[in-house]
């Protein structure tokens, strides 16, 4: 595997950490917010690690918090807000560094349906704004918001779907069908559908 | 069958929680062993039948037993409440699975029975092994070893066993009741959730923080002001209480107030190095403040106890040399100057009958009598008047030559001039004064003279020579004491003069020699060591007991922090901190938390020095270099021990933290 032209195994832990910080943003199923930080400080964490000035951090946070609808909650601690709000704070933390790539690992897994909808809306807005998002999910609904869906079964790419001009509803149907087919087939019988 | 079930479950629980229970059992057993040992020593038959001095040792040991039990009870209770806190989730699960609270109580009862059984079994076994070792150590530090017969083999002291068993019985019943109380008053759901709920940010308790600063400050000021016995007796207990309570307040509220203040300073707080540390420290302090302040207090106690008592023991020889310039100090029962030579002659002839003669003879004179200071004069005390008796102090009058010998200060005095020292302020004192009606001019006010008025409140006057001293001599209440001091080989002392009981008891020897008082340096040294050696032993003993408890507290602190930090460690790695950065941040926090109590204990001990010095000075130990040396050595030794404890427990901590922490 290559990372910016370098073999992964040859990059030091420190460089890897810096790379993650500068180029990648992560969103997790269980939010991974630090309990002892307010939402604001949780979001600032990667910037502080990058050595940014406080004023600069504030400048970045305010518009972002408004987009995510958490600007009233910044002084609160993770245990004081709902799961959806926690996840939005986690997204803010992931994209405040303006990463090239946002990686989301089952971001809707711990959310109720209402929070899931609002999270997917946020992802949609970010994506429209030019943010690349890679999301791993079991949720058909979450996947139906994507521009491109890859089906992975036991570590092998089984199938993929491009959105084209399809609506979310049509995407949902196509993903659903593909899943049914994938689950009813044996692992070797992979097929491509463009 | 059902009984069997609860027992099995209890045994399983102990096994499952062995990471926390094993250290608890070990520390309980060691505590049990130590309590058994000290209790058995205080009832030791060999010690009881030993010569004089040993009964002092026994008394001190009895006192030590009570203190040790008191602290042991607190520790056991404290560590158990820690264990219970970490098991709430488990209890919640049992209740969810359908166990009723009374069933849980039965499990807890079985657990307590096992714990008590193991503790007492191992404790007594270890205690019986330790007993002999401690006995030898005690004989060694008290100097009683020379006339002790130490039988071979191990003995079992039934009394000590019953006492310790009763002690543990009561403590464990209380612990069980507390555990049942915790289970009874908590809902199963809240028990399950408790561990998962986010730790709330502690509130800033400004008043408590300020109180903490004030209390510790007050304690320090009191210690610095306590320059003599009466003040120490007044200030010692309040000062100690102030510092203890103040330390708890400072650790609990002061630390958090300070950290929050730092957090408010945005340009300081939002820096890579400070960001995670400050917020991490706030939570660490919230969880550990009580434990840390306990560790701090314990460390201070160990340091102060061991250093002050070892000063007493290691300074004893030198102190005795200063107090008794010669091996034998005798004071003649003579009122006439002519008889003085006769009294010395009688002693010398008595020595000759044993084929010995007095070496390095030294003679001096002094007048010592009760005096009442009023209106600038020192008057004779009328003992029939209770008011006068109350005001009466000992006035010692010595000659200038003797003063020079003691202090090394050469001052020339005219026949009508004196030097004066007093342990209390004398507001109406003028240049002209009189001692028992004889007029003198005060040439200089001097510091309390060592060996005369540092122990009891009183006055010392220095006159020019024997002729001046003779002017004070009046009646049968007040006459010149003639002292005759000399050396003889120590092994012949008892043979020649008998021990203290025979000398002052039924023997006519002193009467025949015209001797009113005869002290032997060696004899007093033995007597002194039998008391202060025992104090030293108790200090070592309690020091060991406290250290065992401290190790356990530190161990638990590391374990609970390790579990808390693991999740944090994973998240920080996910957000883009390198492993090295995380380790550095965590290490600096752990080091701060770990060494904060030690540093605070060092500061407390430093402020204790005035009290220690004054107390030791009262006990005639005036060598401050020795005091500082011993304090320094004790502190270094303790710090090394502390660092070793750190190194060992930090390993456990890192093992917990780095388990499964390689995510993302």
Image (cartoon, rainbow, N blue to C red):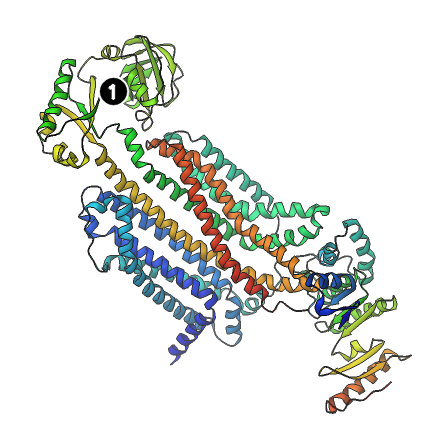
> How busy is the neighbourhood of tag 1: few (under 14 within 10 Å), some, or many (20 plus)?
some
Name the residue at 40% across, 60% down.
B27
Return the residue found at the far right. Answer: A165
Percent of width and height locating residue B573: 67, 63
| Callout count | 1
Name the residue at 55% across, 65% down.
B656
> In the figure, B447 relative to B17: above or below?
above
Quarter of the picture containing the N terminus of chain B is: bottom left
**Horizontal arrangement in the rendering, residue B513 relative to residue B540 (left or right):** left
- From the image, tell me which residue sits under label 1: B368
Quadrant of the image occupied by residue A172: bottom right
Name the residue at 37% across, 34% down.
B615
Percent of width and height locating residue B535: 32, 43
Relative to the observer, which residue lies in front, A134 or B314? B314
Chain at numbered mark 1: B
Quarter of the picture containing the C terminus of chain B is: bottom right
**Horizontal arrangement in the rendering, residue B565 relative to residue B498 (left or right):** right
């Amino acid at each position: 595997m290559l990372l910016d032209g370098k073999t992964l195994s040859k990059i030091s832990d420190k460089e890897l950490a810096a790379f993650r910080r500068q180029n990648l943003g992560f969103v997790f199923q269980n939010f991974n917010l630090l309990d002892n930080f307010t939402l604001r400080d949780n979001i600032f964490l990667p910037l502080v690690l990058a050595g940014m000035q406080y004023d600069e951090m504030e400048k970045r946070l305010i518009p972002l918090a408004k987009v995510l609808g958490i600007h009233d909650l910044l002084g609160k601690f993770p245990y004081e807000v709902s799961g959806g709000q926690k996840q939005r704070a986690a997204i803010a933390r992931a994209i405040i560094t303006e990463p090239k790539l946002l990686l989301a690992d089952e971001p809707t897994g711990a959310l109720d349906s209402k929070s899931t909808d609002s999270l997917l809306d946020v992802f949609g807005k970010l994506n429209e704004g030019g943010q690349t998002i890679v999301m791993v999910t079991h949720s058909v609904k979450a996947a139906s918001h994507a521009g491109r869906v890859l089906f992975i079964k036991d570590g092998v790419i089984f199938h993929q779907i491009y959105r084209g001009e399809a609506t979310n509803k049509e995407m949902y149907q196509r993903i659903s069908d593909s899943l049914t087919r994938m689950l009813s087939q044996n692992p070797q019988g992979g097929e491509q559908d463009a | 069958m059902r009984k069997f079930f609860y027992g099995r479950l209890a045994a399983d629980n102990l096994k499952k929680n062995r990471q926390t229970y094993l250290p608890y059992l070990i520390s309980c057993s060691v505590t049990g062993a130590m309590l058994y040992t000290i209790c058995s020593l205080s009832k030791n038959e060999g010690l009881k039948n030993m010569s004089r001095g040993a009964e002092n040792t026994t008394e001190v040991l009895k006192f030590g037993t009570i203190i040790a039990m008191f602290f042991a009870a607190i520790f056991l209770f404290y560590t158990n409440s820690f264990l219970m806190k970490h098991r709430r989730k488990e209890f919640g699960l049992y209740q969810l699975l359908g166990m009723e609270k009374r069933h849980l109580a039965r499990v807890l009862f079985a657990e307590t029975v096992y714990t008590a059984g193991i503790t007492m079994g191992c404790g007594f076994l270890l205690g019986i092994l330790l007993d002999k070792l401690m006995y030898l150590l005690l004989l060694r530090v008290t100097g009683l070893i020379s006339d002790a017969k130490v039988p071979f083999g191990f003995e079992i002291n039934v009394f000590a066993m019953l006492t310790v068993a009763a002690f543990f019985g009561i403590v464990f019943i209380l612990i069980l009741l507390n555990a049942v109380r915790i289970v009874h008053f908590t809902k199963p759901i809240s028990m399950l959730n408790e561990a998962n709920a986010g730790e709330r940010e502690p509130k800033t308790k400004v008043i408590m923080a300020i109180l903490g600063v004030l209390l510790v400050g007050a304690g320090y000021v009191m210690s610095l002001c306590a320059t003599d016995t009466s003040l120490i007796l007044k200030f010692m207990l309040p000062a100690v209480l102030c510092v203890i309570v103040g330390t708890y307040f400072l650790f609990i509220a002061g630390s958090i107030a300070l950290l929050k203040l730092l957090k408010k300073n945005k340009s300081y707080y939002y820096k890579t190095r400070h960001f995670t540390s400050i917020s991490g420290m706030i939570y660490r302090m919230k969880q550990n403040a009580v434990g840390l302040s306990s560790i701090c207090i314990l460390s201070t106690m160990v340091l102060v106890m061991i250093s002050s008592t070892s000063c007493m023991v290691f300074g004893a020889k030198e102190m005795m040399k200063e107090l008794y310039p010669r091996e034998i100090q005798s004071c003649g029962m003579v009122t006439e100057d002519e008889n003085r030579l006769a009294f010395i002659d009688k002693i010398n002839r008595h020595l000759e009958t044993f084929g010995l003669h007095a070496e390095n003879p030294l003679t001096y004179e002094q007048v010592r009598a009760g005096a009442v200071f009023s209106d600038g004069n020192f008057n004779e005390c009328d003992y029939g008047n209770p008011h006068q008796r109350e005001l009466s102090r000992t006035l010692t009058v010595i000659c200038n030559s003797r003063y020079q010998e003691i202090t090394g200060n050469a001052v020339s005095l005219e026949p009508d001039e004196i030097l004066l020292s007093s342990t209390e302020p004398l507001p109406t004192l003028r240049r002209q004064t009189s001692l028992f009606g004889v007029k003198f001019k005060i040439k200089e006010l001097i510091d309390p003279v060592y060996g005369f008025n540092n122990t009891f409140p009183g006055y010392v006057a220095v006159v020019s020579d024997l002729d001046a001293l003779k002017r004070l001599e009046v009646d049968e209440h007040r006459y010149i004491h003639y002292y005759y001091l000399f050396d003889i080989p120590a092994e012949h002392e008892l043979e020649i003069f008998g021990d203290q009981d025979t000398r002052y008891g039924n023997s006519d020897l002193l009467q025949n020699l015209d001797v009113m008082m005869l002290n032997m340096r060696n004899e007093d040294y033995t007597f002194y060591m039998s008391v202060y050696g025992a104090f030293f032993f108790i200090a070592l003993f309690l020091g060991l007991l406290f250290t065992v408890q401290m190790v356990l507290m530190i161990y638990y602190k590391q374990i609970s922090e390790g579990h808390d930090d693991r999740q944090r460690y994973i998240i920080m790695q996910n957000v883009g901190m390198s492993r090295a950065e995380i380790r550095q941040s965590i290490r600096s926090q752990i080091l701060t938390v770990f060494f904060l109590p030690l540093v605070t204990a060092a500061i407390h001990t430093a402020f204790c020095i005035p009290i220690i010095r004054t107390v030791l000075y009262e006990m005639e130990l005036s060598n401050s270099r020795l005091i500082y040396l011993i304090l320094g050595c004790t502190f270094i030794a303790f710090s090394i021990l502390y660092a070793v404890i750190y190194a060992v427990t930090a390993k456990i901590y890192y093992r917990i933290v780095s388990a499964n922490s390689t995510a993302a």
